[in-house]
Amino acid sequence: MKVAVISDVHGNRHAFEAVLDDIAVAGADEVWCLGDLVGYGAEPDACVDLAHDHVAVCLAGNHDLAVTGEIPLEEFSRGAQLAARWTQEVLAPAHHDFLGALRPEGEQDGIGLFHASPRDPIWEYVLSALLAELCISVQTQRICLIGHSHVALSFTRQAGQVATGESRRQGTELDISADEWLLNPGSVGQPRDGDPRAAWLMLDLGQLTAAYHRVDYDILGAAAAIRAAGLPDSLAERLEYGQ
């Protein structure tokens, strides 16, 4: 089975639609989302609708939990607080209920799923080999998927060795048939690795490979929607730079 892994959509309908189109062309059997359907972006209802229609497995991210009231808004930056509060005000009740039923961790087909990390499914940013080493030491599955950092990454640990890792670009394909792995698909709606294109990962559970993908989307349209909603202009500007 081929699984398209996505994360951190953040209310960016333009990016989400482009990724779903790319996934359809690539022939994925299922889509798994590692959380944060909402937050930052201006079209949360549309993104929850798309997830409902296309995503087989969906986790809650910290921004989703903020919108549903499970995490205090005071734990977020000012821009994130403003976006979360606005999302609470505009989100349809049915979509609020959808988010409220999600959890930040799970397991599917023997793969560990975490919004942030196996050590802290909600908040930990795994951006270094040291943190990856600590996470791999506690994970119970050989392969785990993580999001949250908005950076496309892979970390691996061979028996008797320490974890290593690096950022991943379009077209990278990994053999994950051996060793332990932490894989991050990057962000659909707000990449932070210097590449503004929407990111996703194709996981082939039969061949045990992982392939990283990027796709262009209407960044100007997404930015215009943020400005039209009266959200902080910085949330629109950063999309162009992948930061």
Image: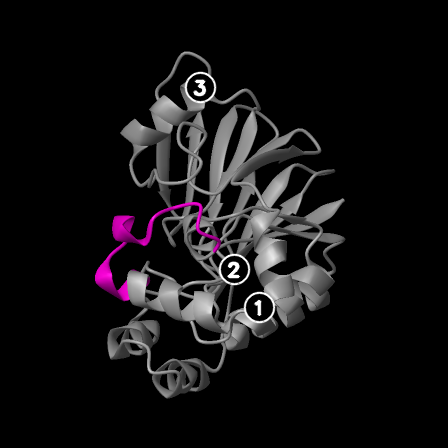
- Indicate the amino acid at tag 1: Cys
Position of the C terminus, as image quadrant, is bottom left
- Horizontal side, residue 26 vs residue 151: left or right: right
Q: Residue at x 74, y 38 (%)?
A: 206
Residue beneath label 1, please?
Answer: 47
- Horizontal side, residue 241 vs residue 28: left or right: left
Q: Residue 130: x percent and y percent?
A: 28, 28
- Indicate the amino acid at tag 3: Val
Q: Is residue 16 above or below residue 150?
A: below
Residue beneath label 3, please?
Answer: 138
Q: Residue at x 25, y 74 (%)?
A: 234
Secondary structure at numbered mark 2: loop
Q: Is residue 136 above or below residue 58?
A: above
* Magenta segment: 68-80
233 magenta-colored: no
Label drawn at residue 37: 2
Q: Residue 119: x percent and y percent?
A: 40, 27
- Horizontal side, residue 231 vs residue 39: left or right: left
Q: Nearer the viewer, residue 52 or 25?
A: 52
- Indicate the amino acid at tag 2: Leu
